[in-house]
Amino acid sequence: MIRAPSVNWRLARFIPFMIEVDVSTTSNNAAPAIGTLAVEGQQFHPQAFPLVYAMSADSVADLSSVTGWIHANLQSLQRELAEHGAILFRGFPLKTDLDFDAFIQMFGLKNFTYTDSLSNAVRRNRTERVFTANEAPANIAIYLHHEMAQTPIYPSALFFFCEQPATSGGATPLCRSDVLLTQIEAVLPTFVQACEQKGVRYTNTMPDQEDLQSGQGRSWRSTLNALDKAAAEAKLHSLGYQWHWLPEDNLRVTTPVLPAVRTLEDGRRVFFNQLIAAFQGWQDKRNVAQKSICFGDGSVIDPQAMAIVIELSEQLSFDMQWQAGDVALVDNSLVMHGRKPFSGERRVLASLLA
């Protein structure tokens, strides 16, 4: 978990111009000129969201010099991730999945593999730590969520890398869950109280074979890393799930009670769950979105309350408009993300951190 000690938010500063950072590196090139940059739609809570680091267009740098900059500033970057929730790196010399993999390794953080995850999205590994973000069709929206918050096991942070932006659309919306929770609580205090006291449960039907037409199309064999039904049931039992086999060897599972609101180490409370994504987007030939969630005691979550939550989250979202080579580092405990529909070929890769 990337986490910083408590900070004084009044001291947080945002510098909307390029500043040269002088660090020694092992590269033959000069130290890269890297500084913070303002971008359209950027928010302040009161710290900039997201924080943007950009390399000067006339900076001559390679990955070796970037390694030096990251190593020299690693503690600051860790602290800033915890403060701001997301950091966008723009203009850095990254073009391929291998460049992205090398960039991730500069941070010295433990990998959270897709194979070992309970993610319900179909993805394709490019390297051991890099994979496609989601293989769902371009016209399908992936709604705001904390990565794998519908499971007992989830990553602490995520990297995204834009190998190729879409022709149109394809933004990655980001939403600060602490700010969202404050706004929800102001208008729906009873709903927030129920979320905290009851928790939530998620129900999802997984196919026997992967379904590329669904944002939740990963097969139960892949999700549970199981070769047969007996192995799948053993895995589900160990996780505290309930399950039911359906025709065509589809598998319907219901999670144990999971928190919908969490308190971070620094005391901030966050709307940490998959309620928005499940309520809006868990819809395919096996699943009905609004039947995919309930409170921990089995009671119904009010659709009108969810409509208000969704509206507030959309108002608070920053749409990450990708440029080729962009890398975003997202604190999964603090920030939700999603994917807007798009046209053209969009290649955004991802990596998870334990």
Image (cartoon, rainbow, N blue to C red):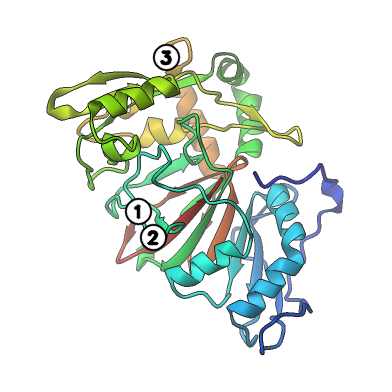
Residue at x-position 48% and y-position 15%: 296
Q: Could you tell me if residue 8 is visible in this image?
A: yes
Helix, strand or loop status at disc 3: loop
The residue nearer to you, when weighing 352 against 321, is 352
The residue nearer to you, when weighing 296 against 279, is 296
Helix, strand or loop status at disc 2: strand
Q: CA distance from mark 2 to mark 3?
A: 34 Å
The residue nearer to you, when weighing 317 against 32, is 32
Q: Are marks 2 and 1 in contact (CB under 8 Å)?
A: yes
Picture coordinates of residue 152, whole percent (x, y): 49, 29
- Mark 2 or mark 1: whose residue is earlier in sequence: 2
Q: Nearer the viewer, mark 2 or mark 3?
A: 3
Residue 207 lies, with reference to residue 252, above or below; the image says: below
- Mark 3 or mark 1: whose residue is earlier in sequence: 3
Give the amino acid at mark 3.
Val
Q: CA distance from mark 3 to mark 1?
A: 29 Å
Q: CA distance from mark 2 to mark 1?
A: 6 Å
Picture coordinates of residue 95, whole percent (x, y): 46, 75
> Horizontally, is 163 left or right of 1 in the view?
left
Residue at x-position 39% and y-position 45%: 115
Quadrant holding the C terminus: top right
Q: Could you tell me if residue 171 is visible in this image?
A: no
Give the amino acid at mark 2.
Gly
For disc 2, the marked residue is 169
For disc 1, the marked residue is 341
